[in-house]
Image: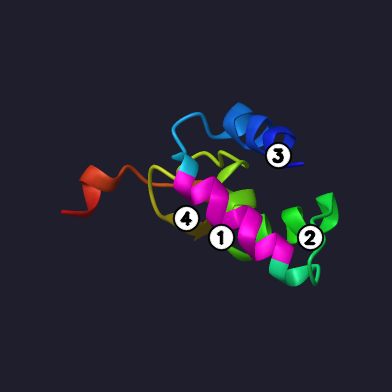
């Protein structure tokens, strides 16, 4: 099971070292009381914050501001704030 999960992790996180993958596997084994299942493995990934990293959310380039004239959110240029 470890080689399969290792390939899965390296597909999404190619720079993750083997020792960290082993830690994830060990935590999955502990969570599953001696059995590693894909559900346990994804639970551990989620708890350690790896699943949120996969979202690749775009960064906001300014601060949202409410405009009463247009009833929309407007993003200001951060350089205007200085």
Circle nearer the N terminus (3, 1): 3
Specify whether 46 is left or right of 21.
Answer: right
Q: Furthest residue to the left?
A: 82
Point out which mark residue 64 bears. Answer: 4
Which label lies toward us, 4 or 3? 3
For the residues marked 4 and 3, what is the alpha-carbon distance in whole angstroms? 40 Å
* 24 part of magenta stretch: yes
Q: Residue 52, relative to residue 44: is it above or below?
A: above
Q: Residue at x 22, y 44 (%)?
A: 79
Q: For numbered disc 3, what is the local secondary structure?
A: helix
Q: Residue at x 38, y 47 (%)?
A: 62
Most frequent secondary structure within the magenta stretch: helix
Which label lies toward us, 4 or 1? 4
From where the camera sits, is residue 71 visible? no
Specify whether 8 is left or right of 1.
Answer: left
Q: For numbered disc 2, what is the local secondary structure?
A: helix
Identify the residue position indicated by label 2 in the image: 40
Q: List x then y, in percent, for residue 74.
A: 50, 48
For the residues marked 3 and 1, what is the alpha-carbon distance in whole angstroms? 51 Å
Point out which mark residue 80 bears. Answer: none
| Range of magenta residues | 19-29
**Of 23 and 63, the residue lying toward us:** 23
Circle nearer the N terminus (4, 3): 3
Circle nearer the N terminus (2, 4): 2
For the residues marked 2 and 3, what is the alpha-carbon distance in whole angstroms? 11 Å
Point out which mark residue 68 bears. Answer: 1
Quarter of the picture containing the C terminus is bottom left
Q: Residue 46, relative to residue 7: is it above or below?
A: below
Q: List x then y, in percent, for residue 31.
A: 74, 70
């Amino acid at each position: 099971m470890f080689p399969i999960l290792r390939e899965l992790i390296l597909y999404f996180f190619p720079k993750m070292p083997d020792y960290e993958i082993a830690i994830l596997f060990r935590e999955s084994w502990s969570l599953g009381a001696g059995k590693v299942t894909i559900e346990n493995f994804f639970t551990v990934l989620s708890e350690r914050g790896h699943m949120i990293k996969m979202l690749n959310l775009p960064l906001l380039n300014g601060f949202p501001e409410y405009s009463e004239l247009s009833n929309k959110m407007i993003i200001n240029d951060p350089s205007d704030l200085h």
